[in-house]
Amino acid sequence: MSPASRRVIWGTIVGIAAVIGLMVVALVGVFGSGYVRHFHLPSEAMAPTFEKGDRFVASMDGGGDLKRGNVILLAVGETTYVKRIAALPGDRIAMNGGLVILNGRPIPQRFLAEERRPEMAGAPPARRLAEQLPGEAAPHEILDMGPSEVDEFPELRVPAGFVFVLGDNRDRSADSRVSRVSMGVDLLPVGDVKGRPLFCTKGCKLGR
């Protein structure tokens, strides 16, 4: 089976399993001039940074100077998502066994803890890991739910005008590893970056 076919099939599986959780943010209020908005997350696709039910205020300024590790808001059609930039234009990115391979070098993951997730009742504990992308000021945390199809992704070079994004809940996020036809984000045009979270009003570990 070709990599493209596997991406389509896995995208469909994620679309069913992660459900509506793929719609990561929902607008609940607008403040000031309309460039700052308050969001609520109905999904765990960015856990453990953002948990389901967390709320945050975002600047809708297009994301500013985009860097690896930035958490951004992005648009896919009429839906708004929150993801993390993993690769910039010109970068080569792949996944091998759940490990990000950036420009030919694996990004180390440091084990922090095991935890049982309420949305995964009866499943083995998830592993909480720390990961730091090149240029990122501090590590961020991710979740590994165990082996999955999206743990493997063939290397590609991010073209000019695009970025490659990942969810922090790596096995429960339809991100740039999944095509838009299959309810994913695919390679993200920079023009689809709509903003960035500023601070949390309920929960989340943004900036901690």
Image (cartoon, rainbow, N blue to C red):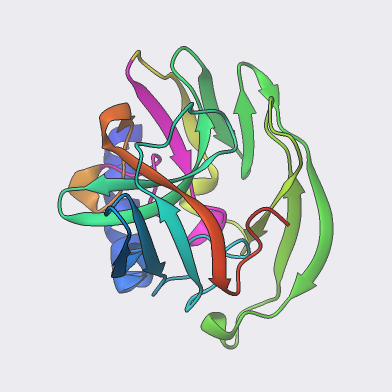
Find residue 178 and report its horizontal and vertical position in percent: 34, 44
> Can residue 83 be seen in the rendering of this structure?
yes
Q: What count of labels does the image hold?
A: 0
Is residue 176 part of the magenta span, yes or no?
Answer: yes
Question: Could you tell whether 161 is left or right of 165 in the image?
Answer: left
Question: Could you tell whether 96 is left or right of 182 in the image?
Answer: right
> 118 or 155, which is in the foreground?
118
> Split into 4 quadrants, where in the image is the N terminus?
top left
Question: Could you tell whether 150 is left or right of 73 in the image?
Answer: right
Q: Is residue 89 above or below residue 78?
A: above
Q: Is residue 20 above or below residue 109?
A: below
Q: Is residue 78 above or below residue 19?
A: above
Is residue 26 part of the magenta span, yes or no?
Answer: no
> Can residue 2 be seen in the rendering of this structure?
no
Question: Could you tell whether 85 is left or right of 98 in the image?
Answer: left
Question: What residue is rendered at 63% in x and 57% in y?
Answer: 206
Find residue 39 and report its horizontal and vertical position in percent: 38, 66
Q: Which contiguous range is marked in magenta? A: 161-179
> 12 or 31, which is in the foreground?
31
> 64 or 120, which is in the foreground?
64
> 198 or 81, which is in the foreground?
198
Question: What residue is rendered at 36% in x and 15% in y?
Answer: 159
Find residue 66 and report its horizontal and vertical position in percent: 48, 28
Find residue 139 and report its horizontal and vertical position in percent: 75, 44
Question: What residue is rendered at 39% in x and 75% in y?
Answer: 42
